[in-house]
């Protein structure tokens, strides 16, 4: 995290997303304590209640019934003179194992990292603490016995607690990190207060930056509940595939004690040369601290990430708010060409927001150059595009454009590569590391590249290869840059179909 200076205050509400959560007038980072409870999705998050740069870390709070429209509530768990409230999770303690219940109401229990401040009793330590709510998550009381798990470490944080029910028994399991050791640590508990070390995982695969915000969950392969695998996700910063913050995942098994990865790469080159081989939750620059909901309905595995990157997070040109959350995504596990991989799709019912007028093209050849599509302009839209490569070395879309300038989302078929080029995306000069061309490996399916793209004022989320590859990026275009264009370089390509749906 870098030096924090407040930005100047020009109004930037043309950047305020329509479909993504932002705090009204404050800073946010990681999603925390995601839980579905009593018919409501709760999104807590790292929040500075007093400003729009990182600091005074507390848990902000918002709720939604559809994962699209969010209502902001007062700060849920506030920092005090002793501790900042760092990331963590929430469980519904149905059996009142913690004893925080009051006889008729079972508690929601938050497990968070106490980042102890200078001069406090545990100065310099990060340890795990509890708070509980008896009113469905709106007001919280800190446990008087905090911290409940202290290793004397300065880098022990981001507890995600799940209920394990399996061959080894039934108990709470915590995954957290020793961030600088590139290690996930696993603990078990019967009452959320007393914790016993189970095992550790890592270092493994990407270790170019501290490990943060882990998660562990089972998923059925191709929807078959008899064929479960466990997924361990770990965010790291920096060290992502296109620099800075990103999230990697491992697929394997968890026997109640140990997570065993089947997707760790141990052979060959240096870490920096293998980034393309690792499994990334998202290849874009702005998808960090992804974590999943507890108790999501219908056994869905739903994740939200912070849509920003520590490389430039405190400098993005929005005010008075800073940083959106990603769209909520549904995660599933597919066997594809003999390999298991995660597949992601937006979880909310975005189709319900579709406006009747949509732009369509079928079977059209694009030639060398840029062609603006009359009638396709917009700032909040879903774009479905299917391309078949021709002689062009590169082709794709220019969105939020102004003639030939804009954000390029394209394919380089010769390199089997998807990319987002934001060099001409609008405002880029607020930080040296923002300007970028970011790439992801992408393969055609039956000869075509199919992309679904969500554009929402200051962001682009690309779902490629049926959701196996995603790229999430912030952009800061001029309010008047609303064109959508197609383009090709060095030859032609075919648009099989193109559909633009305005969302409101
Ligand atoms: C990740 C992170 C966490 C920490 C929190 C502090 O972005 O650094 O590891 O708990 O942010 O705000």
Image: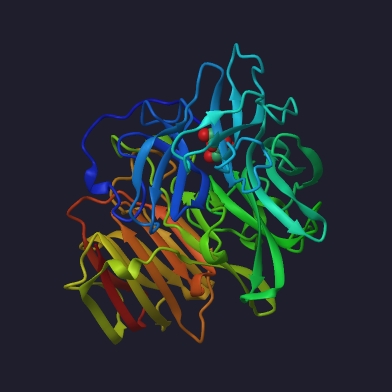
- Depth check: 256 or 399 in front? 256
- Looking at this rendering, what residue extends furthest in the front direction? 103
Determine if residue 393 is in view. Answer: no
Eyeballing the image, is 431 above or below 379?
above
Eyeballing the image, is 159 above or below 465?
above
- Horizontal side, residue 423 vs residue 243: left or right: left
Determine if residue 379 is in view. Answer: yes
Residue 45 pos. (x, y %)? 47, 40
Residue 118 pos. (x, y %)? 59, 14
Q: At x 54% / y 53%, what residue is drawn?
A: 293
Locate residue 453: give its quadrant: bottom left
What's the image's color scheme? rainbow
Q: At x 36% / y 63%, what residue is drawn?
A: 454
Q: At x 35% / y 81%, what residue is drawn?
A: 492
Q: How many marks?
A: 0
Figure quadrant, ligand 1: top right
The C terminus sits in image quarter = bottom left
Residue 347 pos. (x, y %)? 44, 64
- Depth check: 27 or 444 in front? 27
Q: At x 44% / y 42%, what residue is drawn?
A: 433
Residue 5 pos. (x, y %)? 38, 25
- Depth check: 389 or 238 in front? 238
Eyeballing the image, is 288 above or below 265?
above
């Amino acid at each position: 995290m870098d030096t924090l200076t407040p930005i100047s205050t020009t109004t930037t509400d043309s950047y305020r997303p329509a479909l993504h959560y932002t705090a009204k007038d404050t800073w946010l980072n990681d999603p925390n304590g995601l839980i579905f409870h009593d018919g409501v999705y709760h999104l807590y998050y790292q929040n500075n209640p007093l400003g729009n740069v990182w600091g005074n870390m507390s848990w902000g709070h918002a709720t939604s019934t559809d994962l699209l429209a969010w209502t902001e509530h007062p700060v849920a768990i506030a920092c005090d003179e002793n501790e900042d409230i760092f990331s963590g999770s929430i469980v519904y303690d149905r059996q009142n194992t913690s004893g925080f219940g009051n006889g008729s109401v079972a508690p929601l229990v938050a497990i968070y990292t106490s980042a102890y401040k200078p001069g406090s009793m545990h100065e310099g330590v990060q340890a795990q603490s509890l708070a509980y709510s008896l009113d469905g998550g709106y007001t919280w009381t800190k446990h008087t016995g905090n911290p409940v798990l202290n290793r004397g470490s300065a880098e022990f944080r981001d507890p995600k607690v799940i209920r394990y029910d399996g061959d080894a028994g039934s108990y709470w399991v915590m995954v957290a990190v020793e961030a600088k050791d590139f290690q996930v640590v696993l603990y078990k508990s019967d009452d959320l207060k007393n914790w016993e070390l189970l095992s550790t995982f890592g270092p493994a695969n990407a270790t170019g930056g501290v490990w943060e915000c882990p998660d562990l969950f089972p998923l059925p392969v191709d929807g078959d509940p008899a064929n479960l695998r466990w997924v361990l996700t770990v965010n790291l910063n920096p060290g992502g595939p296109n620099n800075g913050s990103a999230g990697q995942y491992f697929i394997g098994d968890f026997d109640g004690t140990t997570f065993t990865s089947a997707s760790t790469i141990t052979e060959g080159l240096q870490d920096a040369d293998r980034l393309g081989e690792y499994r990334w939750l998202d290849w874009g620059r702005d998808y960090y601290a992804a974590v999943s909901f507890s108790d999501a309905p219908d056994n869905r595995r739903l994740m939200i990430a912070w849509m920003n990157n520590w490389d430039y997070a405190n400098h993005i040109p929005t005010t008075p708010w800073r940083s959106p959350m990603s769209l909520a995504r549904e995660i599933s596990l597919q066997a594809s060409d003999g390999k298991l991989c995660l597949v992601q799709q937006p979880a909310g019912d975005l189709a319900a927001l579709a406006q009747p007028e949509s732009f369509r093209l079928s079977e059209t050849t694009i030639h060398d150059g840029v062609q603006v599509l009359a009638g396709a302009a917009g700032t909040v839209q879903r774009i479905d595009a299917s391309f078949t490569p021709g002689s062009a070395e590169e082709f794709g879309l220019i969105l939020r454009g102004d003639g030939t300038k804009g954000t390029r989302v394209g394919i380089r078929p010769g390199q089997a590569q998807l990319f987002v080029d934001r060099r001409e995306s609008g405002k880029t000069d607020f930080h040296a590391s923002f300007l970028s061309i970011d790439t992801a490996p992408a393969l055609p399916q039956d000869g075509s590249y199919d992309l679904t793209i969500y554009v929402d004022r200051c962001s682009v989320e690309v779902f490629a290869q049926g959701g196996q590859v995603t790229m999430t990026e912030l952009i800061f275009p001029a309010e008047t840059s609303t064109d959508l264009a197609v383009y090709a370089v060095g030859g032609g390509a075919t648009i099989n179909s193109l559909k633009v749906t305005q969302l409101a």
